[in-house]
Image (tube, rainbow, N blue to C red):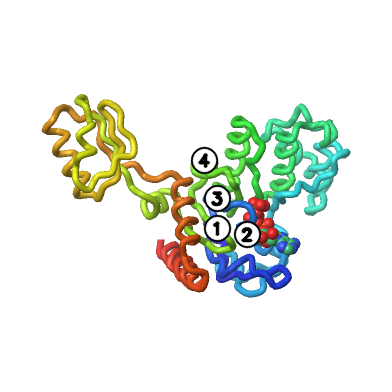
């Protein structure tokens, strides 16, 4: 498990990370979500050791990350750093050689990985002649060439078409299933929601929420209920304690406490056949708005202390699990 514990960082006296604490489990895909400037890249660079934290710790499997273990880290940076004029396969096998593989093994690894990423046909072309989406797949190959134990990717899915997302996802999932930590940042909440097991939400340099996807959906946001009946469901609007968000003919999507929701169900049964009744958990974008909104509403002086306490509780819960 990769753990960050109270990591702080400032640039020129301006603090951009405030007691950042979270963990990413081996075998799982962990999505690191936040808006522009939230602190994702800074956090990832600290994990990789290319940037120092002002305070706090980064641990892998309970021990501080040593420079030698960082050799088993793979990184796909936000600013893509490959050689535009070099042929794709040459580039990837060159990186493999830098990781210590002999020429034959480096070539074998490069070919296998490019095939896995559907890039065999482009293996002999200069990188710059590929579409941006295909260049991005090459970047992913570069991060994976040495079978990293910890894989950190900055926006790996941005700019990929849905088929490419699926290809990259299956490669990352294989890496996680082989026991790696896989942490990637993204702005695309819908993509992260679909792909990740675990989520970490950061806003203005503070961890706002962290945990398993379903656990977060249970814990945050507004729980709603969906009722579909054969009869008209317009009467739901008149039930005390109910706020209807959407209604059409036999369907109502409403907010209510659990007891009131049960009352609605009983009344619906009395009125006719109930085709469907179920709680609707919030989407990740609803959770994101909920937790980000709550931070914005806090007085500035309270924010750090409260968020730290919240992040610590989350970490404790995760350690218990
Ligand atoms: N080298 C730097 N010098 C000064 N400030 C920096 C530097 N790098 C980042 N920052 C600031 O630190 C904050 C966090 O930036 P960071 O790049 O970590 O965010 P991010 O979540 O990755 O954003 P994005 O999604 O836009 O890439 C921002 O306010 C940014 O302006």
Task: Identify the residue shown where x is 24% and y is 38%.
Answer: 237
* Left or right side of 181 for 48: right
State the residue at coordinates (79%, 44%): 106
Where is residue 147? Give x, y as percent. 67, 49
Q: Which residue is mark 2?
A: 39
Q: Nearer the viewer, mark 3 or mark 1?
A: 1
Query: SS at mark 3?
Result: strand
**First in residue order: circle 3 vs circle 1:** 3
- Frontmost residue, 109 versus 67: 67
Q: Secondary structure at mark 2?
A: loop
| Label 1 environment density (alpha carbons within 10 Å; few <14, some 14–19, many ≥20) | many
Q: CA distance from mark 3 to mark 2?
A: 14 Å
Dot 1 lies on which element? strand
Is disc 3 in contact with disc 1, using a CB cutoff of under 8 Å?
A: no
Q: What is the crowding at mark 3: few (fewer than 14 residues within 10 Å), some, or many (at least 20)?
A: many
Q: Is residue 95 above or below residue 111?
A: below
Q: Is residue 129 above or below residue 102?
A: above
Query: Residue tagged by mark 3?
Result: 31
Expressed as whole percent of the image width and height from the top left, the position of residue 103 reads 84, 45
Task: Point out residue 246 in the picture as x, y percentages from the top left corner.
Answer: 33, 35
- Label 2 and label 1: CA atoms lie apart by 7 Å
| Residue at x 19% of width, y 25% of height | 231
Query: What whole-number distance in Å separates the C-alpha atoms at marks 4 and 2?
Result: 20 Å
- Checking the image for residue 279, the label placed there is none
Residue 70 visible in this rendered orientation of the protein = no
Label 1 beta carbon less than 8 Å to ligand 1: yes
Sequence-earlier tag: 4 or 1: 4
Which residue does the numbered mark 4 point to in the structure image? 190
Task: Answer with mark 4 or mark 3, whichever residue precedes in sequence.
Answer: 3
How far is disc 4 from disc 3 in space, using C-alphas?
11 Å
């Amino acid at each position: 498990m990769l753990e960050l514990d109270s990591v702080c960082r400032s640039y020129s006296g301006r603090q951009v990370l405030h007691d950042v604490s979270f963990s990413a489990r081996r075998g799982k895909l962990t999505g690191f979500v936040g808006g522009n400037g939230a602190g994702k890249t800074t956090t990832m660079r600290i994990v990789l050791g290319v940037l120092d934290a002002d305070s706090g710790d980064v641990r892998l499997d309970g021990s501080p990350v040593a420079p030698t273990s960082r050799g088993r880290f793979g990184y796909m940076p936000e600013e893509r750093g490959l050689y535009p004029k070099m042929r794709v396969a040459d580039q990837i096998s060159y990186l493999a050689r830098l990781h210590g593989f002999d020429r034959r093994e480096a070539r074998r690894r490069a070919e296998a990985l490019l095939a896995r990423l559907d890039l065999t046909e482009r293996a002999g072309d200069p990188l710059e002649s590929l579409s941006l989406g295909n260049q991005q797949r090459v970047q992913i190959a570069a991060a994976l060439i040495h079978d990293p134990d910890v894989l950190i990717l900055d926006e790996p899915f941005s700019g990929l078409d849905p088929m490419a997302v699926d290809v990259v996802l299956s490669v990352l999932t294989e890496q996680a299933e082989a026991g790696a930590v896989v942490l990637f940042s993204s702005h695309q909440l819908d993509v992260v929601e679909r792909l990740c097991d675990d989520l970490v939400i950061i806003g203005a340099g503070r961890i706002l929420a962290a945990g398993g996807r379903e656990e977060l959906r249970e814990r945050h946001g507004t729980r709603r209920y969906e009722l579909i009946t054969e009869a008209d469901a317009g009467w739901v609007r008149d039930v005390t304690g109910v706020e209807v968000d959407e209604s059409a003919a036999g369907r109502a999507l409403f907010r209510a406490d659990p007891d009131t929701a049960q009352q609605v169900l009983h009344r619906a049964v009395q009125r006719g056949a109930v085709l469907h009744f179920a709680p609707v958990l919030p989407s990740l974008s609803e959770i994101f708005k909920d937790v980000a909104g709550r931070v914005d509403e806090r007085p500035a002086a309270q924010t750090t202390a409260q968020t730290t306490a919240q992040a610590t509780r989350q970490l404790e819960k995760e350690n218990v699990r």
